[in-house]
Image (spheres, grey):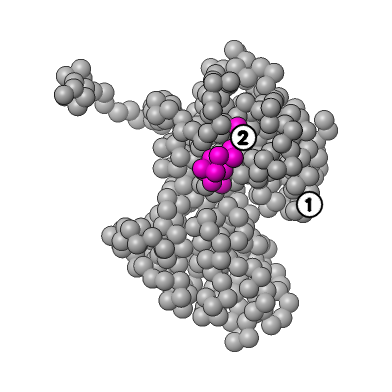
Amino acid sequence: MESIIRDISLAESGQKKIDWVKGHMPLLNYFNEKYAPTQLFKGVNMVVTIHLEAKTAYLALTLKNCGANVTVTGSNPLSTQDDVAAALVANGVTVFATHACTNEEYDMYLDKALDTHPQLIVDDGGDLVNKLHTTRRELIPELWGGSEETTTGVIRLRALAEAGKLAFPMIAVNDSNCKYLFDNRYGTGQSVWDGIMRTSNLIVAGKTVVVAGYGWCGKGVAMRAKGMGARVIVTEVDPIKGIEAVFDGFETLPMAEAAKKGDIFVTVTGCKDVIRKEHMELMKDGVLLANAGHFDVEINKPDLEALSVKAPFEARQNITAYTLANGHQLNLLGEGRLVNLACGDGHPAEVMDLSFAMQFLAMRHVLENKGKLENKLYLLPAELDEEVATIKLRAMGFDVDKLSEEQWKYLHEA
């Protein structure tokens, strides 16, 4: 099947990006060296739907090197990097993805990928799984199972599983320790600020940052903002997380109060309408609005457009300015989509090395257990987390102690 990308002539630029991250992803290098000779996934049709940038490309190439027939699509219209997509095609991977594609094109790309009849899937956000449960159910008998990368996707899967509607086995890779403890906290924490700073070219120190949501992603965003000299306010709906934020040194307020004080707002809740009309009307002139949740619904864009008394305009690349009746200008970054990918390169390579190692092992786990898994949402076995952590530590030049036999008995025997 012929790929659909923007421009194959961009491949050289994309290859440089892939080569760079390859030098900082020792876990995927390890799996390449271990499983490419054995062709672990020989002949297996895989669809990978994740934000299409260099780290994802290297995961796809690793799976291909290990024998899989890999097809890649993006999981967000603004996160696809056209040069990386071109480099993948140049390396023999089928790709359906273009930067800033329309919603109709995005949907068509998913269908094109599913036309390859996958036996294993890697999803990010749940759009691929949703399509398989609705308009492409005819493919379910061929599917052995898959894995999910994000909190948002796992929430959607859990709802399907609890309703008894999940039609094939899925692994919640997001809930693996080597994923959410690092990707969600350190990856999101750094990449969100990378996206905001490179897009706005404004200082963080001295400003008041409002972080909506204090899950693992919110913790990372707040921690990095504090480290750069910002005053941080956290908004939450969970009082326990609210206390945790206070004990971590942050102020906790309802959004109606925080809206009056913030200079930069970052939503990272997984819910919708976190910032809406009544909050926008209270905001200072010149605030930055950024979203780090998977879907572009956390900042209510229809409300923002309705409040604007003149046509929104591009104040700077990737920044859309809205002018309110009181003369205040509110600046939306990356169309309210994932700011770390719409306005940056996503998580650091070293962090995604951990996440994608767990994705690789999830594919191996489903392959090795095909036909044995129920239509349920699974966690990867804890020993796989420990395997990945051990390899990563040693690659970084570190190690940990091991229990002696007597210590093990002390901890485990009655």
Residue 313 location, quadrant: bottom right
Residue 225 location, quadrant: bottom left
Q: Magenta span covers which residues?
A: 156-168
| Alpha carbons under labels 2 and 1: distance apart | 25 Å
User: Residue 126 versus residue 250: which sits nearer the camera?
Assistant: 126
Q: What residue type is labelled 2?
A: Ala
Residue tagged 1: 104
- Residue for point 69% across, 46% down: 80
Q: Which amino acid does label 1 sit on?
A: Glu
Instruction: Assign a secondary structure to mark 2.
Output: loop
Query: Is 395 positioned to the left or the right of 311 in the image?
Result: left
Residue 286, position in %: x, y? 56, 76
Q: Is residue 158 magenta?
A: yes
Q: Does the magenta stretch include residue 281?
A: no
Ranked by sequence position, the earlier of labels 2 and 1 is: 1
User: Residue 168 versus residue 250: which sits nearer the camera?
Assistant: 168
Query: Is 160 positioned to the left or the right of 206 in the image?
Result: right
Residue tagged 2: 167
In what quadrant of the picture does the C terminus appear? top left
Query: Is 414 positioned to the left or the right of 32 in the image?
Result: left
